[in-house]
């Protein structure tokens, strides 16, 4: 169905190939997941399948990419649209129409699908992806996760035989992510569609994959095989695989179900011990919010939320897509709408402060990291950030290297991968050392090592007396870094407490280690590793 024959791809502004001597064959009716470090070329490979590389992106492609026998060198994207549906990392950038229902129908209109068939497919897709209540909504009013589901739905309605998806669950809450993956699983197994995706959230997708492609360093051949084989020794492995390594399970399981079948002995070894307490607040309140309300077009997005952020704590803001997390962050920072309630930082309402002073008091990294980036090169961006923050030359660059190393100084920020662009925006905000830091989906597009680096930075900020809030769907990251969890539903705060007490036993929000070792109170692989070492029984 899809063949890469000795494919090498080099962009004009790059010094070395992004993809080098790639040989890969993906048969019909498989779900294949491409994994690799941030910036390893995953998106480039996906975009080569429908000809966006090199017809749209430019650069040079040597070798051949064949899709159902058609060479992408000879067939531009419009001539592959009947075969390949593509969903990129930024759904909003790919939308053509204004509303959900129109967007679901657009691809079918382009392919001259009869109106009665179009109507049936739209209804099927609305049900399949839980979009019925959004059918008449304007696309720009949707949350990031809702937009991503619409983009996936627009690809599904056209019934192409190949679906290519770049980070399809990165902006989705756990339940919505599972719904999308279950829908893709049914399409693969019941309809015979071929799905090729890139994804960092391997704890979600590994158990659904038939085949996995692990990209290594430039110039090295990719590792292709079953998920368990590919991830067995990889630094990108999800928690359940890393737990299997610690426990000595061979081959390591890739699903919670398989891990629980093996976990009885491990639970016995851990009986009687407990994870260390998570560091929490160490100082006075840095931000106090009372009765915060946010309305959009008559819809109450945030309902009378009280929130106190204290020095030394990392607070995770969880909730399903559309629960009001982003709206609350913007209201706390002072730039977003707030129709009721009060917010105070050091006695001042951030909404009433000048923009520069507001940013010094409360730093915010939005979902779209590019909104913070305006320079033409990475070098200029970090230099501007140093100057604005009054920091020493190279301070922002050093922060960037700690999160995602090796980003080209001369690259344009908008040419970076999502993960690299996010890391750059984080460094730009962190260099100002605001006492309160708000992060909206900070791990989206980041691989496991980059998330570990970000976790270290956030812990250091908290230890230095700052308050950090991260709105996220990444429960594994929450388990690693957060000291407190605030859970929102329909704009209301429905839970607020220590991580274990809020997450334990939740089918949607419990991390993988908790699910495998329940009812024991373990959340992370490192907690288990240290407990076994202390007991003198390492695997």
Image: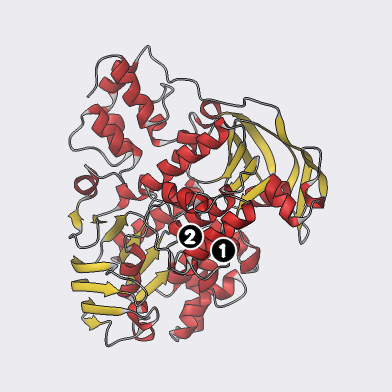
Quadrant where the N terminus lies? bottom left
| Marking on residue 373 | 1
Q: Nearer the viewer, residue 437 or 145?
A: 437
Q: How is the image coloured?
A: secondary structure
| Left or right: 435 as drawn, with respect to 112 | right
Quarter-of-image position of residue 210: bottom left
At a point 35% along the width and 75% down the height, the residue shown is 84
| Marking on residue 421 | 2
| Marking on residue 481 | none
Mark sitting earlier along the chain (2/1): 1
| Left or right: 393 as drawn, with respect to 274 | right
Image position, residue 287 (x, y; %): 72, 37
At a point 29% along the width and 36% down the height, the residue shown is 242
Q: Tag 1, which secondary structure?
A: loop
- How far, Cα to Cα, is label 2 from label 1? 9 Å
| Left or right: 109 as drawn, with respect to 23 | right
For mark 2, does the 10 Å Cα neighbourhood hold few (<14), some (14 to 19), or many (20 or more) residues? many
Image position, residue 266 (x, y; %): 28, 22
Is residue 145 positioned above or below 13 on the image?
A: above
| Left or right: 243 as drawn, with respect to 142 | left
Q: Nearer the viewer, residue 420 or 132?
A: 420
At a point 56% along the width and 54% down the height, the residue shown is 428
Is residue 327 positioned above or below 277 on the image?
A: below
Q: Nearer the viewer, residue 76 or 409?
A: 409
For mark 1, does the 10 Å Cα neighbourhood hold few (<14), some (14 to 19), or many (20 or more) residues? many
Do callouts 2 and 1 mark residues in contact (Cβ within 8 Å)?
yes
Quarter-of-image position of residue 337: bottom right
Q: Tag 2, which secondary structure?
A: helix
């Amino acid at each position: 169905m899809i063949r890469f024959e000795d494919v090498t791809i080099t962009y004009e502004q790059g010094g070395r190939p992004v993809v080098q001597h790639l040989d890969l064959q993906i048969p019909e009716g498989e779900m294949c997941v491409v994994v690799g470090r941030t910036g390893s070329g995953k998106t480039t490979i996906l975009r080569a399948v429908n000809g966006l590389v090199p017809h749209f992106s430019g650069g040079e492609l040597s070798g051949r990419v064949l899709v159902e026998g058609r060479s992408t060198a000879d067939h531009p994207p419009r001539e592959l649209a009947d075969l390949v549906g593509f969903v990129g990392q930024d759904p909003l950038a790919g939308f053509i129409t204004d509303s959900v229902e129109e967007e679901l129908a657009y691809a079918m209109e382009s392919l001259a699908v009869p109106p009665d068939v179009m109507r049936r497919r739209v209804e099927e897709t609305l049900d399949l992806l839980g979009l019925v209540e959004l059918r008449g909504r304007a696309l720009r009013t949707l949350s990031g996760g809702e937009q991503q589901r619409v983009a996936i739905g627009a690809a599904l309605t056209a019934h192409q035989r190949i679906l290519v998806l770049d980070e399809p669950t990165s902006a989705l809450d756990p339940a919505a992510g599972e719904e999308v993956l279950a829908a893709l699983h049914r399409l693969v197994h019941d309809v015979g569609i071929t799905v090729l995706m890139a994804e960092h959230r391997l704890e979600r997708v590994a158990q659904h994959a038939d085949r996995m492609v692990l990209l290594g360093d430039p110039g090295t051949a990719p590792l292709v095989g079953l998920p368990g084989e590919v991830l067995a020794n990889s630094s990108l492995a999800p928690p359940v695989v890393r737990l299997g390594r610690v426990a000595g399970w061979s081959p390591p399981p890739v699903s919670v179900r398989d891990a629980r079948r093996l976990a009885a002995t491990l639970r016995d070894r851990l009986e009687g011990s407990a994870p260390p307490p998570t560091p929490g607040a160490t100082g006075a309140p840095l931000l106090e919010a009372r009765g915060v309300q946010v309305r959009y077009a008559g819809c109450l997005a945030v309902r009378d939320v009280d929130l106190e952020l204290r020095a030394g704590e990392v607070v995770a803001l969880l909730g399903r897509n559309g629960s009001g997390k982003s709206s609350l962050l913007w209201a706390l920072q002072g730039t977003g709408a707030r129709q009721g309630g009060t917010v105070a930082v050091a006695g001042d309402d951030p909404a009433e402060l000048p923009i520069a002073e507001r940013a010094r008091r409360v730093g915010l990294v939005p979902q779209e990291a590019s909104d913070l980036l305006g320079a033409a090169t990475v070098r200029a961006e970090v230099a501007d950030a140093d100057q604005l923050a009054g920091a020493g030359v190279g301070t922002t660059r050093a922060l960037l290297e700690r999160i995602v190393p090796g980003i080209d100084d001369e690259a344009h920020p908008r040419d970076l991968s999502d993960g690299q662009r996010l890391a750059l925006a984080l460094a730009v905000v962190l260099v100002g050392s605001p006492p309160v830091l708000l992060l909206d989906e900070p791990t989206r597009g980041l691989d496991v090592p980059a998330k570990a680096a970000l976790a270290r930075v956030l812990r250091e900020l908290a230890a230095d007396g700052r308050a950090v809030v991260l709105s996220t769907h990444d429960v594994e990251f929450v388990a690693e870094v957060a000291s407190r969890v605030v859970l929102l539903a329909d704009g209301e705060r429905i839970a607020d407490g220590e991580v274990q007490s809020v997450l334990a036993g939740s089918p949607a929000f419990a991390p993988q280690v908790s699910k495998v070792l329940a009812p024991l109170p373990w959340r992370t692989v490192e907690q288990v590793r240290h407990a076994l070492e202390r007991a003198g029984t390492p695997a």
